Image (tube, rainbow, N blue to C red):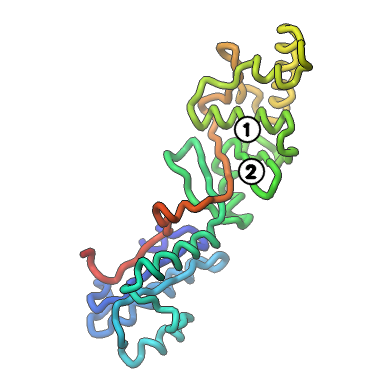
Amino acid sequence: MVGSLLLPGGVLVQDVHLSTLYFIPADRWWESIYLAATVRGMFPKHQPAVRFVSNKRGYAATFGRDLMDAGFDPREVMDKAELDASVVPSIASDVDVRFPLELTSSLRSRPIPVAAHEDSRHEIERALDLVEWDVGGRVELSGRLLTGPVTFRPGSNEAVTWQRLIDERLADGAGVPVAEVGQRLAEEGAERAEISNLAARHIHALRGRLSSSAAIVTANRAYALDPAVTVGRVRRRAGSHLRQPPVSAVAKTDPPE
């Protein structure tokens, strides 16, 4: 159950307590550390960080040795009395390092932290039809509707149009007005007909990148992604842990207070 709550490479926090998990003998409470070791072993490629916290000043004689045998450093057990000053900042730092990106998608009501490794990227691309990657000073588009990722120069007309289409889809908006697209492409003083033609040719080129041209629809003088198209945007996270630490899973060995 604990393992199922963790993302690969996530953060597992375990509170060491004399009232143990039900499947661990009460007189051998320190064996709860092997729960953490077992869960960590479920992720051979992207192992989670394991952080122990406790309010105890002394441990059973074997606790430190058992920690080391399980691959943990007993010197890293954090003091629960330092929750605000040490524990939360340490865990938040772990999350920031391990999940430096953030995914906003049409499938979720709120953004989620994302790891920067390729396995995480491939998982997102398999789950969504279109994904905009706005990281590292460049704009990339990928997802199930594309045969492979496409890279754009930031601020280019095609990059801006894709970003606006994804903006509108994420916001359940009415779409990007044809006039807005055309005026961005046209020279100053262009006639309305020319603006419309430039917009139409531009959108035709965008549709040509997709495995289904029907993914971009035209309605009410606006271009939009079909409501059935799932989209996402990945960007770097910025201080979200200050409001609510997005820890992947918390395994407490004591009952809720």
Point out residue 5 in the picture as x, y percentages from the top left corner: 40, 58
The image quadrant where one finds the N terminus is bottom left
When the figure is inspected, residue 204 is found, relative to residue 171, above or below; the finding is above
What is the three-letter code of the residue carrying label 2?
Answer: Asp
The image quadrant where one finds the C terminus is bottom left
Label 2 with label 1: CB-CB less than 8 Å: yes
Judging by the rendered image, the residue that carries numbered circle 1 is 163
Q: Residues within 10 Å of mark 2 (few under 14, many from 20)?
A: some
Viewed as shown, does residue 68 lie left or right of 207? Answer: left
Q: Nearer the viewer, residue 36 or 104?
A: 104
**Element under label 2?**
strand
Q: Residue at x 44, y 60 (%)?
A: 6
Point out residue 204 in the picture as x, y percentages from the top left corner: 72, 21
Point out residue 35 in the picture as x, y percentages from the top left corner: 37, 73
Q: Quadrant of residue 249?
A: bottom left
Viewed as shown, does residue 155 lie left or right of 105? Answer: right
Q: Residue at x 62, y 23 (%)?
A: 216
Q: Would you say residue 124 is visible in this rendering?
A: yes
Judging by the rendered image, the residue that carries numbered circle 2 is 134
Point out residue 31 in the picture as x, y percentages from the top left corner: 34, 81
Q: Residue at x 73, y 12 (%)?
A: 195
Disc number for residue 7: none
When the figure is inspected, residue 42 is found, relative to residue 234, above or below; the finding is below
Q: Would you say residue 34 is visible in this rendering?
A: no
**Element under label 1?**
helix
Viewed as shown, does residue 11 lie left or right of 168? Answer: left
Q: Quadrant of residue 183?
A: top right
What is the three-letter code of the residue carrying label 1?
Answer: Gln
When the figure is inspected, residue 225 is found, relative to residue 54, above or below; the finding is above
